[in-house]
Image (cartoon, helix red, strand yellow):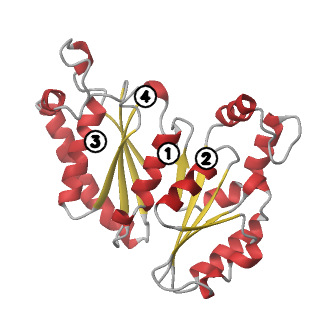
């Protein structure tokens, strides 16, 4: 069977970068396909093809027609995934004003255009399999996230799990299903020898994981996930993103995320790891 990925989202949230990344991953990328044609695409592709449909540019898609087309695709034999790209309004406005590009649905008032587009795409966003917040991601980080989510290594069956670390000082990720706070653990930042390192370095990982409360936390979260993941799979959830945060996203959250990723991966799950703020 073929695999379809429908990519929609806010203008300025990174659709061009996502399209280019999918092309690099050998997806067949079709941009701005009318909804009236999209619903019949399942009849036109062969088995084992991967087709990305980039839609919704500038709020121009008729959302009810688009949702109907997606429903029509899902009624066939193929695997269908939907990705919605988003970012905070202030980020989208800043991106347009910084590049002096005209917003696709307005000539002058970018802020009003962003608000109008968000309202028009609300129902589409609510039905997406994956909501990806690009507000804190640069181009290379967004490209890495797409490779993790839709690269060849992720094609095997089963729910796709992303374990993400982040720093609360840079904001909580919007595109996650669960958030854990590890700021209760001793902070390696206050150790002069550890401050320049991060949680992927052995010395920092040892410092963090040697704490009894860290081991208790890991045991309890692993037990929780052992219950939740099979339940999510039974309910048909195909993507799960779990975020672990500390103050700056460089030490404690990174070490804990690496440890959790290893434990869940050893249980047979399909896990990718992403450290949003480790290089700040």
Q: How far apart are marks 4 and 2 (CA)?
A: 23 Å
Left or right of 277? Residue 193 is left
Q: In this view, does 136 lie to the left or right of 200?
A: right
Q: Which of disc 1 and disc 4 is earlier in sequence?
A: 1
Eye-nearest disc, 3 or 1: 1
Of 267 and 11, which appears nearest the observer? 11
**Element marked by disc 1:** helix
Give how far across and how far down residue 246 sits, in percent. Answer: 34, 29
Of pointers 4 and 2, the one earlier in the residue sequence: 2
Q: In this view, does 153 lie to the left or right of 30?
A: left
Report which residue position mark 2 lands on: 14
Q: Is mark 2 on a helix, strand or loop?
A: loop
Rendered image: mark on residue 168? 4
Which residue in the protein does label 3 denote? 257
When the figure is inspected, residue 279 is found, relative to residue 243, above or below; the finding is above
Q: Which residue is drawn at 64% across and 81% down?
A: 41
């Amino acid at each position: 069977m073929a695999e379809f990925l429908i990519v929609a989202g806010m203008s300025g949230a990174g659709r061009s970068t996502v399209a280019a990344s999918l092309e690099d991953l050998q997806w067949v990328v079709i941009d701005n396909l009318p909804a009236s044609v999209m619903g019949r695409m399942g009849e036109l592709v062969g088995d084992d093809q991967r087709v990305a449909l980039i839609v919704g540019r500038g709020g121009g898609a008729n959302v009810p027609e688009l949702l109907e087309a997606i429903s029509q695709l899902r009624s066939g034999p193929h695997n269908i995934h939907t990705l919605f790209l988003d970012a905070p309004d202030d980020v989208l406005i800043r991106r347009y004003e910084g590049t002096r590009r005209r917003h696709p649905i307005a000539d002058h008032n970018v802020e009003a255009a962003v608000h109008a587009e968000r309202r028009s795409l609300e129902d589409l966003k609510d039905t997406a399999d994956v909501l990806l917040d690009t507000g804190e991601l640069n181009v290379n980080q967004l490209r890495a996230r797409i490779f993790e989510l839709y690269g060849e290594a992720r094609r095997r069956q089963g729910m796709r799990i992303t374990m993400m670390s982040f720093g609360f000082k840079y904001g909580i990720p919007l595109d996650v299903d669960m958030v854990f706070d590890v700021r209760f653990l001793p902070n390696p930042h206050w150790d002069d020898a550890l401050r320049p390192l991060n949680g992927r370095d052995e010395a920092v990982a040892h410092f963090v994981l040697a704490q009894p409360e860290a081991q208790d936390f890991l045991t309890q979260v692993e037990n929780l996930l052992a219950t939740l993941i099979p339940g999510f799979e039974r309910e048909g959830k195909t993507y799960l993103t779990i975020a672990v945060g500390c103050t700056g996203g460089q030490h404690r959250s990174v070490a804990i995320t690496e440890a959790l990723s290893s434990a869940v991966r050893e249980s047979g799950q399909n896990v990718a790891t992403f450290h949003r703020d480790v290089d700040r």
